[in-house]
Amino acid sequence: MKRKTLLISALSILFAYPGIAQHAEEVGISPWGPDDEIGALNMMDGQSRLSVLSRIGSGEIYDLSVDYFVGMPSFHSLGDPPYQYWLTHTPHGTVVDNPNGLGRAMNEKVSYTGDAISMYTHMGTHIDALNHFGLNGKIWNGFTPEEHLGDKGWKKTGAETIPPVVARGVLIDVAAYKGVKTLDNNYRVNAADLQGALKRQGVNLQRGDVVLIRTGQARHYAHAEKYLHDYPGINLEAVRWLVEEKEIMLLGADNLSFEAFPPEREDNWVPVHTYLLAEKGVMFIEQMYLEELAADGVYEFAFIGASLRLKGASGSPMRPLAIPLE
């Protein structure tokens, strides 16, 4: 009877958390070799970039990034610093302080404003590097902190290794497919949602695409409390379909942390993150602004984006652009 009870208990866990039954979570070893630090971005090359650039049919540019401002949404609940901004020089202050030593007359004539910021690297529109999350003591391609993490950041897969991205981009407007402005709280976007939205839009995915998923959550970005809590996101089934069946190169979404919470697996608090970054070497962009792109029905475009070369960092701010294709 005891063995039967244990079996029933184990089966109940598997049904409740299907990701546990589907696969064991293990760090992926790159098919691009033992020195690979960029994973799926290896799909991109000079020819693929030229191919998409040659199809640009408009001078219109959509900015897919959000503003940075004091009070913006952040991960401060995890202990990370919020965005801070302060002035280091003001026109009046330079007259009083004379920091350049050129005197009152010069500083009254030539006004001088300078400023500084401090922030967590995963704030605003940003890309997650492959060292951001790992599994069982390793990150993508088997790199370990014992060998590759120094006091000044990772020696492997740091944000400085992320190349400028130029590729075909596809918007999947799940909110519009569902007929809502914003998906329900904690809604998990699944593969059927993506397939239904693509069919509605009349767009097919191709290997090496950059796929951006609209939940509508960016509508609340200016109001941190609404944006931060109970936001919708993508589920494991959906990212497996995108990565394993459609071979997308890069993902993005308009919510805080890409996946929805609480997590689908009881043994992993960020299973989508670890599946993409640690297992498959697929980076993704968070906190995007996709509202204008969606409003104009632009579902296929040239995606152009470059992140800051923050040496050793686990992520970097990014300002992605979308230019409609012919």
Image (spheres, helix red, strand yellow):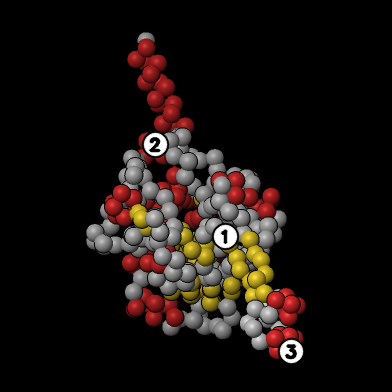
Disc ID at residue 20:
2
Q: Is mark 2 on a helix, strand or loop?
A: helix
Q: Residues within 10 Å of mark 3 (few under 14, many from 20)?
A: few
Mark 1 or mark 2, which has the lower sequence index? 2
| Residue type (three-letter) at the residue carrying disc 1 | Met
Q: What residue type is labelled 3?
A: Ala
Question: Tag 1: Cα neighbours inside 10 Å, few (<14), some, or many (≥20)?
Answer: some
Question: Which quadrant holds residue 101?
Answer: bottom right
Q: How far apart are marks 1 and 2 (CA)?
A: 36 Å
For the point 44% across and 69% down, the residue is: 309
Which residue occupies the extreme top position in the image?
1
Q: Does dot 1 land on a helix, a strand or a loop? A: loop
Q: Kindly state the secondary structure of the residue where label 3 is placed.
A: helix
Closer to the eye: label 1 or 2: 1
Lateral position of residue 22 relative to residue 94, left or right: left
268 displayed left or right of 280:
right
Of label 2 and label 3, which has the lower sequence position?
A: 2
**Marks 1 and 3, the one that precedes in the sequence:** 3
- Name which residue lies at 58% across and 78% down: 61
In the displayed structure, would residue 171 be above or below residue 147? below
Res 105 label: 3
Residue drawn at (46%, 34%) of the image: 266
> Distance from label 2 to label 3 (Cα)?
72 Å
Amino acid marked by disc 2: Ile
The reply to whether residue 245 is visible in this rendering is no
Q: How dense is the environment of label 2, judged by Cα within 10 Å: few (below 14), some, or many (20 and up)?
A: some
Of residues 140 and 249, the one nearer the viewer is 140
Q: Name the residue under label 1.
A: 119
